Image (cartoon, rainbow, N blue to C red):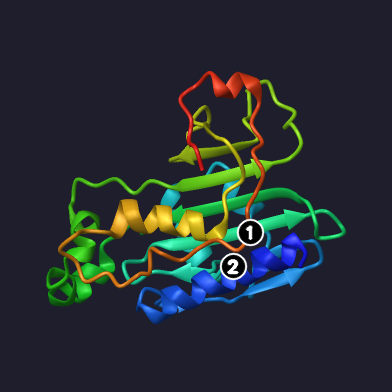
Amino acid sequence: MKNQEKVFKEVRKVTKELIRCGLAEEYNFPMMQKAEVVWEKYSDISYYLKNMEYSNIYSEIEKNHNFNVKLPDGGILQLMYRFNSHGTELESHRLAYYPSPSYENYQNDAELYDADYLYGDILNKDVLPVIIRADYSRKKVKSQIHHPYSHITLGDYKNCRIPADRPISPIQFVKFIMEHFYYEPSSQLKYNFKLESIVQFDEHIAEIDTKKSRIII
């Protein structure tokens, strides 16, 4: 099975798991589009990478249903992979988590949310919504600023690129978001953290990045 097909199956698998455990309020199943794995209703995401206020970025994504999954608290997941023309070698990926910038859902149905520990942190007024992005490019990015091949970006800060030792699979990324933003030992979260990745990516990290604090996948 080609790597593109494996990633497609894995995105579908993790989407179905989020639906099963009640965490997919809205969703689009993945689709293979030429050399890419994207989602139904996918449209060019470069628009969201421009210098815009976060609330406007989120609003555009939500309005156009341009995501894999929208979670009950408004958090949005995007999982996009690009391969070579044969579907065998990963060229790049862009994985993103967009938390909701507002508390409208909570204000409209406060009792539902107060009854569940799952949204405790998200409902705190002192919490700042932060975009989490995991990017990978097999080729070096031409820029005056160093780009690790695989890296995590927090809050879209220009110089925040935390190196990772390899590309990240769909299940690994969703597990990361579930573990660090939604999981509480006392909650009723039913997500299956034992889901295993179908695809395994090889290590790809520059020597300069091995000398930094980094993420080991």
Residue 165 falls in which quadrant of the image?
Answer: top right
Amino acid on which disc 2 is placed: Glu
Q: Label 1 belongs to which residue?
A: 199
Q: Is residue 57 visible in the rendered structure shown here?
A: no
**Can you say whether 165 is above or below 107 in the image?**
above
Within 10 Å of disc 2 (Cα), the crowding (few <14, some 14-19, many 20+) is many
Residue 32 falls in which quadrant of the image?
Answer: bottom right
Instruction: Give the CA distance from mark 2 to mark 1.
Output: 8 Å
What x and y, as percent, mark residue 114?
13, 69
Q: Is residue 139 left or right of residue 123?
A: right
**Can you say whether 12 is above or below 119 in the image?**
below
Seen at 73% across and 60% down, the residue is: 3
Extreme-right residue of the structure:
85
**Can you say whether 160 is above or below 217 in the image?**
above
Earlier residue among tags 2 and 1: 2
Checking the image for residue 10, the label placed there is 2
- 61 and 163: which is toward the camera: 163
Q: Is residue 127 left or right of residue 6?
A: left
Look at the numbered disc 1 and give the secondary structure of its residue. Answer: loop
Seen at 80% across and 61% down, the residue is: 35
